[in-house]
């Protein structure tokens, strides 16, 4: 039976909040009669008094008839009324996305519903709406998830997952009255996911979510340099901006190993002076056209630090912006920089100016 459960009339302010309980057809008429509900096909619409407070949070249920962009609410599914037997494995977060990610739309695309338990450690997660953050975080392990698709983008990866992992989710739908419904989930890794374990997410789904992040950033920062979707074998996973600079994080979702950081900010006189210090130790200085590119990082240092902690840092200034790229595959990163930011040149046009690596 494809019953549905309504959690929130999210778009249109109605005169009541409706809850739909998925139960077998035999008991549906009896429950509707007892609760004073209305039978509608395979669902029972139950009217809850607007002034009834939630016993766990204490806030008035009428306060969640409209959810503003860039906010979240907790809810339980599939037993929202069973207040005496709360099960954390039935706790979810409903997020209305920030406006720049589509949260201003008055349709189902503005909402996401994820399990409120972090993958692996089962810690209660929360969406943080602050500028430069706007992500879901696990306070126990420090894991971070994207709001757009629930993708795990930072923190320890559960060892049982060998593919990209995301938070289990609930599929939502919207009726003609603006009521938000939960579609019956399939709790398998390749469908809605498994609570506490995760949800498999494909590379195409990751790229789609990353493209939304890119489009949003380019719309709000039209004068910023190009942000590539893929860079040196890695896919964009996160964008953080504080106004004067943007930090990009890329991850190799194919091998599930390796990451890149990309820092772009307005160049200062100090940046220029630092870049052109041709005697700086453990550095290589290259040139393409009129632009000097410095390569440094702890990968040039001779010490006993494990290779997995060593990486190169590439810095250059172009069109008034200071670029810093950090990663392990030096040649691949150099080629991608030339291809993305110096399209009028070939990689063979890049030449070594000086080297101070001992």
Image (spheres, rainbow, N blue to C red):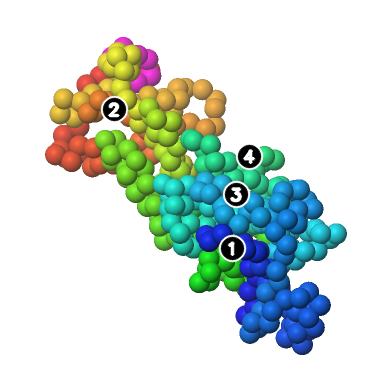
Which of the numbered marks, if any, corresponds to residue 14? 1
Which mark, by number, is residue 131? none
Q: Quadrant of residue 64?
A: bottom right
Quarter of the picture containing the N terminus is bottom right
Q: Tell me where residue 311 sits by quadrant.
A: top left
Q: Is residue 233 left or right of residue 183?
A: left
**Furthest residue to the right?**
84
Residue drawn 63% across the image and 45% down it: 126
Residue under label 3? 72
Q: Earlier in the sequence, mark 1 or mark 4?
A: 1
Which of pointers 3 and 1 indicates the residue nearer the eye?
1
Tag 1–tag 4 contact (CB < 8 Å):
no
Depicted 337 relative to depicted 22: above or below:
above
Residue 291 within the segment the image draws in magenta? no
Q: CA distance from mark 2 to mark 3?
A: 35 Å
> Disc 1 or disc 4, which is closer to the eye?
1
- Our reading of the magenta stretch's main secondary structure is loop
For marks 3 and 1, give the CA distance. Answer: 20 Å
| Residue denoted by label 4 | 142
Q: How many marks?
A: 4
Contact (CB < 8 A) between labels 4 and 3? no
Q: Are marks 2 and 3 in contact (CB under 8 Å)?
A: no
Q: Which residues are magenta?
A: 278-284
Q: Is residue 356 above or below residue 25?
A: above
Mark 3 Cα-neighbour bin, 10 Å: few <14, some 14–19, many ≥20: many
Numbered disc 4: secondary structure: loop
Report the residue marked by disc 2: 321
Judging depth in this view, the residue of 106 and 114 nearest the camera is 106
> In the current view of this chain or complex, which residue is farthest to the bottom?
26
Going 49% across and 63% down the picture, which residue do you hit? 108
x and y percent of residue 241 in the render? Answer: 42, 34
């Amino acid at each position: 039976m494809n019953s549905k459960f309504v959690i929130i009339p999210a778009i249109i302010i109605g005169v009541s909040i409706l809850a739909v309980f998925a139960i077998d057809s035999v008991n549906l008429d009896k429950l509707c009669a007892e609760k004073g509900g209305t039978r509608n096909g395979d669902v029972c619409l139950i009217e809850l008094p607007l002034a009834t407070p939630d016993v766990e949070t204490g806030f008035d249920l009428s306060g969640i008839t409209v959810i503003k962009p860039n906010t979240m609410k907790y809810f339980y599914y599939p037993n929202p009324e069973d207040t005496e037997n709360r099960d954390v494995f039935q706790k979810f977060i409903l997020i209305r996305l920030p406006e720049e990610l589509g949260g201003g739309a008055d349709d189902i695309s503005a909402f996401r519903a994820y399990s409120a338990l972090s993958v692996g450690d089962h810690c209660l997660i929360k969406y943080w709406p602050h500028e430069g953050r706007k992500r879901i975080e696990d306070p126990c392990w420090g894991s971070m998830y994207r709001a757009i698709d629930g993708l795990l983008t930072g923190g320890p990866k559960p060892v049982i997952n060998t593919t990209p992992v995301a938070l289990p989710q609930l599929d939502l739908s919207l009726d003609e009255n603006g009521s938000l419904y939960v579609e019956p989930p399939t709790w398998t890794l390749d469908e809605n996911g498994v609570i506490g374990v995760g949800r498999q997410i494909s590379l195409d789904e990751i790229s789609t979510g990353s493209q939304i992040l890119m489009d949003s950033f380019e719309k709000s920062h039209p004068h910023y340099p190009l942000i590539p979707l893929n860079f040196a074998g890695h896919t964009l996973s996160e964008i953080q901006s504080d106004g004067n600079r943007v930090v990009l994080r890329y991850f190799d979702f194919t091998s599930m190993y390796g990451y890149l950081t990309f820092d772009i900010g307005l160049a200062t006189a100090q940046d220029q002076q630092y870049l052109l210090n041709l005697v700086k130790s453990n550095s290589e200085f290259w040139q393409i056209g009129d632009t000097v590119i410095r390569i440094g990082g702890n990968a040039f240092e001779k010490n006993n630090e494990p290779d997995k902690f060593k990486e190169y840092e590439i810095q250059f200034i172009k069109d008034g912006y200071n670029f810093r790229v950090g990663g392990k595959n030096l040649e691949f990163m150099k080629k991608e920089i030339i291809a993305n930011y110096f399209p009028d040149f070939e990689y063979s046009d890049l030449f070594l100016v000086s080297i101070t690596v001992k």
